[in-house]
Image (cartoon, grey):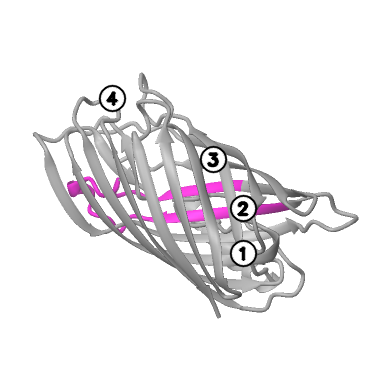
Amino acid sequence: MKKILLSGMLVVVMCPQAWAQYNQENGVSASEADSTPAPVPSNPSYPWGATSSVTYATGDFGTGTTTDTVYIPVTVSRYFSQGKLDLTIPYAYKKSGPGVTLINGRGVRTSHATDGTTTASGLGDILLKGSYYLLQETDSKPFNMSLIDQVKLPTADDKKGLGTGKFDDTIGTELSKSLGDYWQVFSNLYYTFVGSPNGEDLKNQFTYDVGAGYKVTSQIWAHLYYEESTAIISDTSNPRTLFIGGDYQLTPPVDIFSDLGIGLSEGSPDISISFGAGIKF
């Protein structure tokens, strides 16, 4: 609990220091299911943003029973000159057998057992994320670097397997660099202090991803990246997923995006598909 309180204090302290707006013309859009970092301009045009998406995922996670999930987050963002603050309120649906719980909208293998196949839906875990842009790419600064802190509030029903019923705290860094006028490379590193419900011994989790984005036209970005996380229980596979997707800018403040995830291990869903849209105002 002390870690959670310190995390919340860090988010509050960082907010008044000015945080920045995403510039679609210079980078790849990021959704809840897509952790690709957004580059930051020096003069934000829109102080607010709203994003929503729908993600469907299916796989057995090594349990022998298929789990289907639907995750629909709505995120409201407040941009400042050196970072941003995101509040995500999600709806979650899960149809699964024993041993799979939703964490941040994704199915995760846990040791919690239920009898037979169960179906549940409702409010997911609310997320509060603060990002501080430590570096912004310029002629004198070679890349973008953000420090992040995200608190997961246990608002999902843990008895239905929609969450763990415990607080989580994630700290990390998000890096990106432009290569000429068309390419951008990026990598994100996160460490999550995972709260363990009664009867569970969930391990803290390290996650990283690495990938690249390509500017197809002035309105279209495509991206490809690999993501891996450590397993939160012993003797299970690390979740490993390859994502391919893109972003289309309808107008300067409006864009749509999609992602296809291909599971590369039993710790990941076999397939995940995401569609979403965002608006800045």
Q: Which amino acid does label 1 sit on?
A: Gln
Tell me the amino acid under the disc marked 2.
Pro
The crowding category of the residue bearing disc 3, from other C-alpha atoms within 10 Å (few below 14, some 14 to 19, many at least 20), is some
Disc 1 target residue: 219
In the rendered view of the protein, which quadrant contains the C terminus?
Answer: bottom right
User: Which stretch is magenta?
Assistant: 145-172
Q: Are marks 1 and 4 in contact (CB under 8 Å)?
A: no
**Residue 260 percent coordinates (x, y):** 43, 44
Query: Reading the chain from its start, which is encountered first: label 3 or label 4?
Result: 4
State the image quarter where residue 112 is shown: top left
CA distance separating discs 2 and 4? 31 Å
Q: For the residues marked 1 and 2, what is the alpha-carbon distance in whole angstroms?
A: 17 Å
Q: Mark 4 points at which residue?
A: 62
Of the two numbered discs 1 and 4 in the rendering, the one whose residue sits closer to the viewer: 1
Identify residue for label 2. Answer: 37
Q: Which residue, given by chain and number where applicable, does mark 3 sit on?
A: 191
- In this rendering, position of residue 134 left or right of residue 280: right
